[in-house]
Amino acid sequence: MRRYGKHTDEDDIRTRPGRRGTRPRSSIRPKHEDAAEGMVLTVDRGRLTCLVEDRTVVAMKARELGRKAAVVGDRVALVGDLSGRKDTLARIVRIEERESVLRRTADDDDPYERVVVANADQLAVVTALADPEPRPRLIDRCLVAAYDGGLEPLLVMTKSDLAPPDKLLELYGTLDIPYVVTSREELEDGAAADRVRAQLEGRVTAFVGHSGVGKTTLVNALVPEERRRLTGRVNAVTGRGRHTTTSALALPLAGPGGWVIDTPGVRSFGLAHIDPSRVIHAFPDLEAGTEGCPRACSHDEPDCALDAWVAEGHADPARLYSLRRLLATRERKEGD
């Protein structure tokens, strides 16, 4: 062990560098002006599969992006190995500004907001007419998220061979939402896929729906060359479907062009991230009647003008009931 005497020189004294080294930190980050443009197709445990020109590239998010996460549909900038060869890895250095965002929370008590899809311009809400029974409350919640995120809604009703669509069509008819009705036989012969495909031409469409409604089966029919795992059967005891899609996946739509984004089946659609005052925007048939409401009206109080609006025949009473039920669920968990 070296010992120093009374007359030591600075050069004789060794200093131990800090844990982060002695290199000064800088807030300057590279601009990566030569980065390639890409689109995120799917995300799996930190690995993002992106489309760069005509090839798929696996990438990781750069540390400089911090906690900002890329999701399916994001347009990103990539550097590194962009060959797409096996066992190669690129790096995402920038996430471009999003034009639209579909968001949800696990439930209305969960403060953590989850971005499901970015840059989609249409939301296809898939619901079965039977087996499992349709859930108008869940449909309403998806519509609220669509309007809030800047997506246009499309209603797709499956299994019309088991039950007629009249009740749902009457309930949502005043919203003027485009819709498609399909049956299981039509899915097999391709007729259903053709009708749905006509609504998707040249657009980026995210598909959402309760487990077991046939969402992934429909996506497989639309993009047969990109078939996912075989769909699960509906649980005969609970009536709930088994999850067959575990992560969102963007698939190119052949022919007319466009993209289909298959998302995992949902059992609930929390709206904790949405201001209650914006929920009314999902009900355009009722929104005009709020002009006579008192300031900060909750739309569920004695002085609410919507009661008179509905009584005068401007909107279906079922829609007002659905709105109020939806607003009420923000203070308690879903019960159906």
Image (spheres, rainbow, N blue to C red):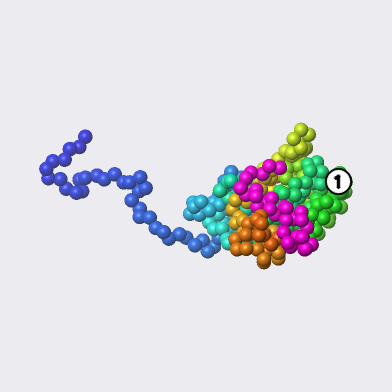
**Which one is in front, 293 or 34?**
293
Residue at the front extreme of this rendering: 302
**In the foreground, 263 or 336:** 336
Residue at the outermost left position? 6
Residue 244: percent from left, percent from top: 72, 41
On whether residue 144 falls in the magenta region, the answer is no
Q: How many circles with numbers are drawn on the protein?
A: 1
Compare residues 49 and 231 and report the one nearer the observer.
Answer: 231
Tell me which residue sits at (69%, 48%) in the image. 263
Q: Quadrant of residue 38?
A: bottom right
Q: Residue at x 39, y 58 (%)?
A: 26
Does the stretch in magenta take in 308? yes
In the picture shown, does residue 62 fall above or below 286? above
Residue type at tag 1? Ala
Left or right, 148 with reference to 112:
right
* Viewer-nearest residue: 297 or 256: 297
Callout 1 environment at 10 Å: few (<14), some (14 to 19), or many (20+)? some
Residue 173 placement (x, y as % from top left): 80, 58
Q: Secondary structure at mark 1?
A: loop
Which residue is farthest top? 237
Q: Which residues are magenta?
A: 307-336
- Name the spot of residue 192 as percent of width and height, x first: 84, 52
Give how far across and how far down residue 102 sits, in percent: 64, 55
* Residue 72 visible in the displayed image: no
Q: Work out which quarter of the rendered image holds the N terminus and state it.
A: top left
In the rendered image, the quadrant that contains the C terminus is top right
- Name the residue at 65% across, 52% down: 327
Residue that badge 1 annotates: 163
Magenta stretch prevailing secondary structure: helix
The quarter of the picture where residue 95 lies is bottom right
For the question of whether residue 13 can be seen, the reply is yes
